[in-house]
Image (cartoon, helix red, strand yellow):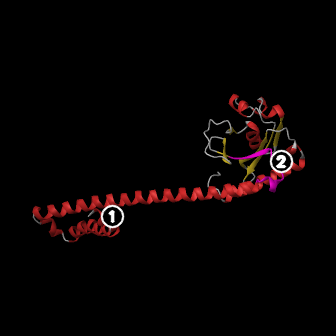
């Protein structure tokens, strides 16, 4: 019985819906029906009430099933978009394409509603307490976001108090000697994230004007990918 209801829930919902509408309509159209014996009106009223309850239950169940289906579909689409995004970013930021020294590693972060830059590449879903998560205005990436411009640092400046790092962040980045960050901007020029390159070698690659322009061009390409493919950007 349960399998039959599950298989024919659509038809059953229609029949019950007709019954729910038909009973009060019939009594309204034929007033004399209100004078029928209670033994007749009682079962009709009971059947009507049961039909109404079943309509609500079946409709609610269908809504829940539809909601779960939509949620699962959204998760699958988001996962597919993220896989495509990662593949494109890996290609865009490959050293063979950029010519950037291999000592540098890249991070792409997106600003959340709490003004925190959360990495989405190469790692994502980090805890907000992770030292690689920066508030706007802190760290090279947070400073680049706040200034809407390229920010670079060398040697001790990478991990000292210059960029208002926490003690945990200072310890985490203590071995790094060079960093460069640039904001990711939308079509209106407003920052929504940051692209950063960091190295344990004291490489001055990004200290040149040409390299800064290259960093801006890379950021524009990365922003285009995120805004058109990824489901995460604001």
Position of 79 relative to 24 (above/below): above
Residue under pointer 1: 6
Front position among marks 2 and 1: 2
Q: Residue at x 15, y 68 (%)?
A: 33
Q: Is residue 187 visible?
A: no
Position of 82 relative to 10 (above/below): above
| The quarter of the displayed image where residue 24 is located | bottom left
Position of 170 relative to 197 (above/below): above
Label 1 neighbour load within 10 Å: few <14, some 14-19, many 20+: few
Residue 207 in magenta stretch: no
- Give how far apart the Cα atoms at labels 2 and 1 are: 61 Å
Secondary element type, mark 1: helix
Label 2 neighbour load within 10 Å: few <14, some 14-19, many 20+: some
Secondary element type, mark 2: loop
Which region is colored magenta?
93-109
Residue 105 in magenta stretch: yes
At which x and y percent is residue 116? Answer: 66, 40
Q: Is residue 136 visible?
A: yes
């Amino acid at each position: 019985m349960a399998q039959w209801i599950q298989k024919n829930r659509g038809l059953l919902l229609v029949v019950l819906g007709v019954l729910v509408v038909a009973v009060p309509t019939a009594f309204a159209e034929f007033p004399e029906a209100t004078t029928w014996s209670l033994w007749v009106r009682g079962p009709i009223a009971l059947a009507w009430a049961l039909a109404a309850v079943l309509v609500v239950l079946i409709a609610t169940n269908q809504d829940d099933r539809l909601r779960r289906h939509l949620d699962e579909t959204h998760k699958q689409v988001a996962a597919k978009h993220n896989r495509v995004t990662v593949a494109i970013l890996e290609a865009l930021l490959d050293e063979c394409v950029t010519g950037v020294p291999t000592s540098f590693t890249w991070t792409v972060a997106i600003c959340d509603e709490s003004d925190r830059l959360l990495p989405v590449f190469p790692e994502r879903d980090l805890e907000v307490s992770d030292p690689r998560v920066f508030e706007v205005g802190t760290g090279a990436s947070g400073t680049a976001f706040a200034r809407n411009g390229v920010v670079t640092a060398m040697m001790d400046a990478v991990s000292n108090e210059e960029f208002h790092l926490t003690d945990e962040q200072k310890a985490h980045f203590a071995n790094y000697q060079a960093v460069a960050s640039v904001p990711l901007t939308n079509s209106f020029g407003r920052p929504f994230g940051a692209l950063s390159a960091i190295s344990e070698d004291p490489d001055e690659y990004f200290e040149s004007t040409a390299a800064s322009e290259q960093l801006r061009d890379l950021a524009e390409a990365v922003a285009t990918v995120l805004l058109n493919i990824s489901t995460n950007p604001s």
